[in-house]
């Protein structure tokens, strides 16, 4: 393709006897738009890297040497040949690995490349129906078509690739259902269909994928329930069906997934109770059931999940007390329970025996004192407890946790003086203690924090703020209070919404 712009890495790798065989062809991070690759002629001077020889369609051999183009390694032919000699991909009859990712290719691929074991066409502009003739690639092990513009349904013929181990069709605008034929793969280990326009129910046949360790079919528009047959996928380590319009109960059969480490069902319409049987998944490290319609209490036998690092149950309709056993989970790093109906006291030992770094129990009906060791592990960075009924004073030990970044305790019934020493909280960026019953003076040395107009006793706010509609901002280095009225156009404090980081990252 004459005149193509080279802006990234392009390479082929030959065997030691490279005169006859090409085993790998890689064309990445380039601004190429070749249209159909089978019929277009490509300038060989753009393709070769590594020392060796390659065969052109004219039968002549070109010896390649390394040069640098645009800061990336590329190739230029060593001896001059006919400038009209071009290199269609089809001549690579022994090619086993083809990487065309991060380009702008479209249209079609040549079906003549029958010996491939790896085909990576991710992050291109292929459109229309999926590649015709892909079922002929019977040696294919890796198929990555992530991030294209396909239309129509997921290709059923892919299920004929019985050697396939990695299948990535995510983010490519496929529509319609997942075919039941997708349960026929014999060796598949990784399946990623997230971020498409897939509808209808999840086929029961996916439960036959006994070799799959990673299944990511989230961010679609299914109908119906989670099939109980998924509990038959004994090798599964990662299961993500988040943001997928699912309803009904969480299947108890998932307890049989003994190797499961991550389970993400957030942002669905799941209802009913959390099955206590999930505590039998002893390998579980990440559990996110947030943003559903789940009711009932947290199973007490979750205390048996000693490997659990993440527990996200926020934005549901759950109630009851937080089990004491949650505080004894030795690996727990994130506990996000906000926007439910939990009541009672938090476990008194919370934070003492775990690796907690982030706790958000805001917008519940919790009461009592803040557990004294909640930030004790030295890695704690976010404590969010606003809009509850917590009482008592704050522990002076809060100032010992220099890793603390955000502290939101507003809208509770805390009282007494504020014991925080902001000179010790070197990383703190946001503190909100408004709508409590604190008294006394304002601590000095903070970077940025909010007390709010409702702070104080007897109608006079802490630090002498008399106007309830105003906020008081402490700005590091300025050494004085600065008032912002309701009509102030400058935003002095960023509002924070407690949301799961997995929502943004699950399909990256």
Image: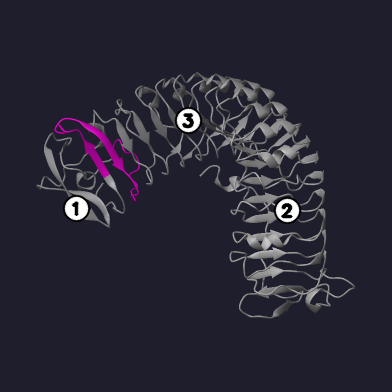
Residue 265, position in %: x, y? 64, 36
Main secondary structure along the magenta-highlighted residues: loop
Determine the image quadrant of residue 263. top right
Q: Is residue 226 visible?
A: no
Residue 380, position in %: x, y? 62, 54
Region of the chain picked out in magenta, as a range: 11-39
- Label 2's element? loop
Q: Which mark is residue 390?
A: none
Determine the image quadrant of residue 126. top left
- 129 magenta-colored: no
Ranked by sequence position, the earlier of labels 2 and 3 is 3
Q: Nearer the viewer, residue 298 or 488?
A: 298
Nearer the viewer's eye, disc 2 or disc 1?
A: 2
Give the total number of marks visible in the rendering: 3
Residue 10, position in %: x, y? 28, 46
Residue at label 1? 67
Residue at label 2? 372
* 96 on left or right of 85: right
Nearer the viewer's eye, disc 3 or disc 1?
A: 3
Could you tell me which residue is drawn at 76 percent across and 41 percent down? Answer: 322
Residue at label 3? 190
Q: Nearer the viewer, residue 298 or 157?
A: 298
Ranked by sequence position, the earlier of labels 2 and 1 is 1
Residue 220, position in %: x, y? 60, 37
Nearer the viewer's eye, disc 2 or disc 3?
A: 2
Kindly give the residue lying farthest to the right in the view shown.
Answer: 458
Q: CA distance from mark 3 to mark 1?
A: 37 Å
């Amino acid at each position: 393709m004459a005149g193509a712009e080279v802006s990234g890495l392009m390479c082929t790798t030959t065997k030691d006897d490279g005169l006859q065989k090409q085993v790998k062809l890689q064309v990445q991070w380039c601004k190429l738009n070749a249209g159909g690759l089978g019929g277009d002629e490509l300038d060989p001077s753009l393709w070769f890297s590594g020392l060796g020889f390659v065969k052109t369609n004219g039968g002549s051999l070109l010896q390649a040497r390394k040069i640098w183009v645009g800061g990336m390694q590329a190739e230029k032919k060593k001896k001059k040949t006919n400038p009209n000699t071009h290199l269609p991909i089809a001549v690579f009859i022994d090619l086993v690995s083809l990487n065309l990712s991060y380009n702008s290719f479209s249209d079609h691929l040549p079906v003549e490349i029958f010996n491939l074991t790896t085909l990576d066409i991710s992050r291109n502009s292929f459109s229309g129906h999926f590649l015709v003739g892909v079922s002929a690639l019977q040696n294919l092990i890796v198929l990555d078509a992530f991030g294209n513009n396909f239309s129509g349904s997921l290709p059923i013929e892919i299920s004929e690739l019985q050697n396939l181990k990695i299948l990535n069709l995510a983010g490519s605008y496929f529509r319609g259902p997942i075919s039941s034929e997708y349960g026929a793969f014999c060796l598949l280990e990784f399946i990623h269909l997230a971020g498409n326009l897939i509808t209808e129910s999840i086929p029961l046949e996916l439960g036959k994928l006994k070799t799959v360790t990673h299944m990511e079919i989230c961010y679609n528009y299914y109908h119906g329930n989670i099939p109980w047959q998924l509990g038959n996928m004994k090798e599964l380590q990662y299961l993500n069906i988040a943001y997928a319009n699912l309803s009904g109960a969480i299947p108890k059969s998932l307890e049989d997934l003994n190797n499961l480490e991550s389970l993400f069902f957030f942002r669905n319409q799941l209802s009913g109770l959390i099955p206590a049987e999930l505590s039998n998944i002893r390998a579980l490290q990440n559990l996110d059931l947030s943003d559903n319609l789940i009711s009932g209490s947290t199973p007490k036998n979750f205390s048996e999940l000693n490997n659990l690092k993440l527990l996200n149950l926020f934005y549901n309709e759950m109630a009851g007390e937080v089990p004491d056993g949650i505080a004894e989970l030795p690996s727990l790093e994130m506990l996000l329970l906000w926007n439910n109906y939990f009541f009672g006291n938090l476990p008194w030992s919370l934070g003492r025996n775990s690796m907690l770094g982030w706790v958000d129990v805001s917008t519940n009906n919790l009461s009592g004192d803040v557990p004294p060791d909640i930030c004790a592990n030295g890695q704690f960075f976010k404590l969010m407890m606003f809009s509850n009924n917590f009482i008592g004073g704050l522990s002076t030990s809060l100032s010992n946790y220099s890793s603390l970044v955000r502290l939101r305790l507003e809208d509770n019934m805390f009282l007494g003086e504020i014991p925080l020493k902001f000179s010790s909280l070197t990383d703190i960026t946001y503190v909100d203690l408004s709508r409590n019953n604190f008294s006394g003076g304002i601590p000095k040395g903070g970077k940025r924090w909010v007390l709010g107009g409702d702070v104080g006793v007897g109608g006079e706010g802490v630090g002498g703020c008399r106007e309830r509609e105003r906020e008081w901002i402490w700005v590091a280095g300025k050494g004085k209070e600065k008032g912002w009225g309701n009509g102030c156009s400058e935003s002095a404090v960023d509002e924070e919404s407690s949301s799961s980081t997995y929502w943004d990252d699950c399909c990256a």
